[in-house]
Image (spheres, rainbow, N blue to C red):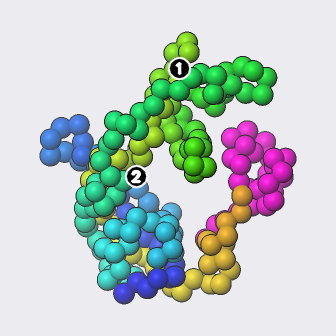
Amino acid sequence: MIQNEQMVKASFELYIQGEQEGQEAMIHRASEEQPMAYCQGVGMMLPAFESRVAELAAGEAFDFVVPCAEAYGEYDERGVKELPKEMFYNGDGEFDDEHVYVGNVIPMRTEDGFNINAEVIEITDDKVTIDLNHPLAGEDLHFVGKIIDVRDATPEELEAIRHPKHCCGKCKSEGQKAKGECDCGGEGCCSSNSLE
């Protein structure tokens, strides 16, 4: 049985409904050579996923469906917003087409100060249309896999999970700076949070 604050490694394939009725499409795979690693009970995974694997032990297989209501909810048309293009101008007063383009997911901040991700779905002469729905909203998630390893998390791992280091993403997107060398001013920016 998997307890809270234990590290879990799992291989799995994730399927959603395909284009044709009754057909599934695989959208993600974590192999046994490159498994998914997470800490149970600290919010790294969907609670519905964790509750379904909690009774398993290393070496045991799983095959279950998480309904969209227990995953990322139904798709909400109200999550599609048209915003003035000026909101996406850079410091030079020009439209930031390097980061804001159709299909890209960009960080946004709500009026309440919460950070969220939004997918750009359309750009016109004066508007940018974004979708605030999770990419898997409205989808039932079918997980097929195996628990590879379960062990207690170390104090260092729990500390890294509870207090992750800041990363602006700029150095990663530019591909120019090594970890810890970003000039954004964030303390510890892009330092590794690896659970390995």
Q: Identify the residue position indicated by label 1 in the image.
A: 127
Q: Is residue 2 magenta?
A: no
Mark 2 or 1, nearer chain start: 2
Looking at the image, residue 161 lies above or below residue 139: below
Estimate the x, y position of residue 101 in percent, counting from the top left. Answer: 56, 26
Identify the element where label 1 is drawn. Answer: strand
Estimate the x, y position of residue 114 in percent, counting from the top left. Answer: 57, 51
Q: Nearer the viewer, mark 2 or mark 1?
A: 1
Instruction: Evaluate whether residue 172 shows in this view.
Output: no
Looking at the image, residue 178 lies above or below residue 152: above
Quarter that holds the C terminus: bottom right
Q: Residue at the location (67% across, 70% down)?
A: 163
Pick whichever, 70 or 11, lies toward us: 70
Quarter that holds the N terminus: bottom left
Magenta residues (range): 167-196
- Kind of residue at disc 2: His
Estimate the x, y position of residue 141 in percent, counting from the top left. Answer: 30, 56
**Total numbered circles:** 2
Residues at marks 2 and 1, CA–CA distance in whole angstroms = 33 Å
Within 10 Å of disc 1 (Cα), the crowding (few <14, some 14-19, many 20+) is some
Q: Is residue 182 magenta?
A: yes
Q: Residue at the location (49% across, 69% down)?
A: 43
Asked if the residues shown at circle 2 and circle 1 are in contact, with their CB atoms under 8 angstroms apart, the answer is: no
Which of the 4 image quadrants contains residue 105?
A: top right
Instruction: Evaluate whether residue 66 shows in this view.
Output: yes
Looking at the image, residue 110 lies above or below residue 99: below
Left or right: 60 as drawn, with respect to 29: left
Estimate the x, y position of residue 66 in percent, counting from the top left. Answer: 28, 61
| Circle number at residue 28 | 2
Identify the element where label 2 is drawn. Answer: strand
| Circle number at residue 8 | none
Which of the 4 image quadrants contains residue 31?
A: bottom left
